[in-house]
Image (cartoon, helix red, strand yellow):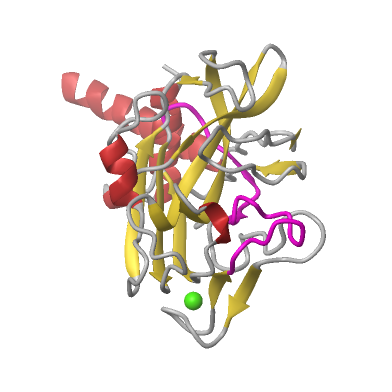
Amino acid sequence: MRAVTVATALVAVCLLLLASAFSPQPVLQAQTLTPAPLPTPTPQRNSQPFTIITEGTIMNTNYAVLPDDWDLTYGSGPQIIYLDTSVYRSSPSSIRLEKHVAGVDVNSAREVNTAGININVGDRLVFSGYMKTGTSEFGDTGYCGARIGIDFYGTYNGTTKRITGLQSDGANGIYPNESAAAILAHYVAWGSDWTQRTIDYTVPATIMADGSGHPQGAMCVPIGVILWLQVWSSTYGSTDSGLAYFDDTTFYINPEEEAEGLPVAVSSALLMLMRNR
Ligand SMILES: [Ca+2]
């Protein structure tokens, strides 16, 4: 009798999982957010509003396909972001980022962004990309070259704004405790051949605001991210004429579910059940 009861329970659990797997996932309403200025020394970011896209129902989607998921324009007027079909890691192209010229282009951040991507507390975010850099016009060293990062957005006092940015590998804190050594190590220095950098970060329940959007020190619940590719320097900013190329970018939400060997839909349903306990 006991074996039969256990078997019956197992069948019930499997049916529940299958039902959950094939039931429609909630779709968030698209929201329009207004990015806020970054704190010093991180440069001013795009002032254009953006729309959050949902993460959808398939967990192994790459949300950073190059070039499709990257915004090749930044504000109005002349641009400094180009598709390059002669320098790339994988055919047919990479993204080339040229220097910022004050008064000519508005991309003083010297960066490339994705749209807003919906995330949830507890999600594991894995963002990776390859960078190749030219020579620094100024011979700059240290906190300079090419890098990748993640800006977090969340709601506080009824408005959704930028919370803060993650500038290192995700294993060494986030504002105000992000390791300076980890930020330094996350740069791909000038004069580098194709080099991969990866951010692996699990979204905490709250993230402290750095003051660029929400009031500094406010604890905010993260609801979305914008990924960025950037050339930056602590001394010469975005005006260095050294070029940077970005290729083979990937951004996965909860990729570990595939590694468990379970069908993606079933493992996603299991995760949802665990979250909702
Ligand atoms: Ca490519």
Give the residue displayed 61% in from the left and 15% down from the top.
215
Q: Quadrant of the C terminus?
A: top left
138 shown above or below 160: below
Determine the residue located farthest toward the bottom in the rendered image. Answer: 86
Give the residue displayed 53% in from the left and 21% down from the top.
209
Query: Is 156 inside the magenta-drawn segment?
Result: no
Magenta stretch, residue numbers: 98-122
Query: Is 117 inside the magenta-drawn segment?
Result: yes
Is residue 162 rendered to the left or right of residue 78?
A: left
Q: Can the viewer see residue 262?
A: no
User: Could you say where residue 241 lies in the image, as x and y percent from the top left?
Assistant: 54, 69
Is residue 155 rendered to the left or right of residue 15?
A: right
Taking depth in this image into account, of 64 and 259 the one nearest to the observer is 64
Q: Can the viewer see residue 260?
A: yes
63 shown above or below 164: below
Determine the residue located farthest toward the right in the rendered image. Answer: 77
Quarter of the view holding residue 177: top left
Is residue 124 rendered to the left or right of residue 244?
A: left
Q: Assign the magenta stretch its main secondary structure.
A: loop
User: Could you say where residue 113 lies in the image, as x and y percent from the top left?
Assistant: 61, 53
Taking depth in this image into account, of 21 and 106 the one nearest to the observer is 106
Give the residue displayed 74% in from the left and 38% down from the top.
30
Q: Quadrant of the N terminus?
A: top left
User: Could you say where residue 154 lies in the image, as x and y percent from the top left?
Assistant: 60, 25
User: Could you say where residue 137 lies in the image, as x and y percent from the top left?
Assistant: 47, 69
97 shown above or below 163: below
Please give the count of numbered marks on the rendered protein: 0
